[in-house]
Amino acid sequence: MKFGILVNEGPYQHQASDSAYLFCKAALAKGHEIHRVFFYHDGVNNSTRLTEPPQDDRNIVSRWTKLAEAHGVDLVVCVAAALRRGIREENLAPGFRISGLGQLVESGIEADRLVVFGD
Amino acid sequence: MTEGTAKKFMFVNRTAPYGTAYALESLEVVLISAAFDQDVSLVFIDDGVFQLKKGQQTKGIETKNFSPTYRALEGYDVEKLYVDQESLVARGLTEADLIVDVTVLPSRELGALMDEQDVVLSF
């Protein structure tokens, strides 16, 4: 099955991005396709390379980067939500790209299921 | 895109308009999805019904009053607006308190409507 994913919450504050990541990993392991992960609302904070968690904690941002590198998952950050929150091209972590909300709608059209992670 | 190939997108709005950014940013996706010629509907449930309340005054909280945008939705061919009856009644509101024409439905019927959708986005 082809999945589209929407992440609406920031990392570390909320479990949504952890759950979304674990869902992607499990779906890929089962042979499904992740069409795209779209980051919206505070979810855009998943994409900043300035994130530096303590050594003994998971690195949520680099986990997404590794997922993109290993499986070619398209990680898209909403431009309007990003700019509001100080996320720009120059502080994006590798594997992420900034684009418009049209990418979310397109994911809803092209994927078999769009799964929303958020409050 | 023709009627046959459009997907049914439903936006479920559950939060009050100004406590969080969900309502404003939900509206932004609604406008984009309408531009993609999809079959778009909106549902207002729980505190989400406050998004449609008439007479919003946001000057005191120094936030933009975006409620007039709901009135502009018709111009984008977004005409299916549903409000959960129980949520409305529980907050002492009636249809006359809302800034746009809506269809008020009991939860059970809203549930059936959700069942018919291809994509449900909940904010």
Image (cartoon, rainbow, N blue to C red):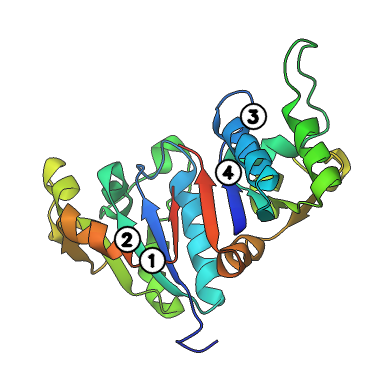
Q: In the rendered view, does B15 fall on the left or right side of A108?
A: left
What percent of the width, then of the height, locates residue A118?
50, 39
Q: Amino acid at mark 4?
A: His
What percent of the width, then of the height, locates residue B18?
41, 41
Q: Amino acid at mark 2?
A: Met
Residue matched to label 4: A41
Could you give the CA–CA distance between mark 1 and mark 4, rounded to whole angstroms? Answer: 23 Å
User: Is disc 2 in contact with disc 1, using a CB cutoff of under 8 Å?
Assistant: yes
Q: Quadrant of residue A3?
A: bottom right
Residue matched to label 1: B117
User: Quarter of the image containing the C terminus of chain A?
Assistant: top left
Could you give the CA–CA distance between mark 2 and mark 4, rounded to whole angstroms? Answer: 23 Å
The chain under label 2 reads B
Same-chain status of marks 3 and 4 = yes
Residue matched to label 2: B114
- Mark 2 element type: helix
- Mark 4 element type: helix
What percent of the width, then of the height, locates residue A90?
88, 42
Q: Please tell me which residue is depicted at 38% across the width and 45% down the height of the picture.
A: B17
Could you give the CA–CA distance between mark 2 and mark 1, rounded to whole angstroms? Answer: 5 Å
Q: Please tell me which residue is depicted at 41% across the width and 36% down the height of the picture.
A: B19
Residue matched to label 3: A11
Could you give the CA–CA distance between mark 3 and mark 4, rounded to whole angstroms? Answer: 12 Å
Same-chain status of marks 2 and 4 = no
Q: Residues within 10 Å of mark 2 (few under 14, many from 20)?
A: some
Q: Amino acid at mark 1?
A: Gln
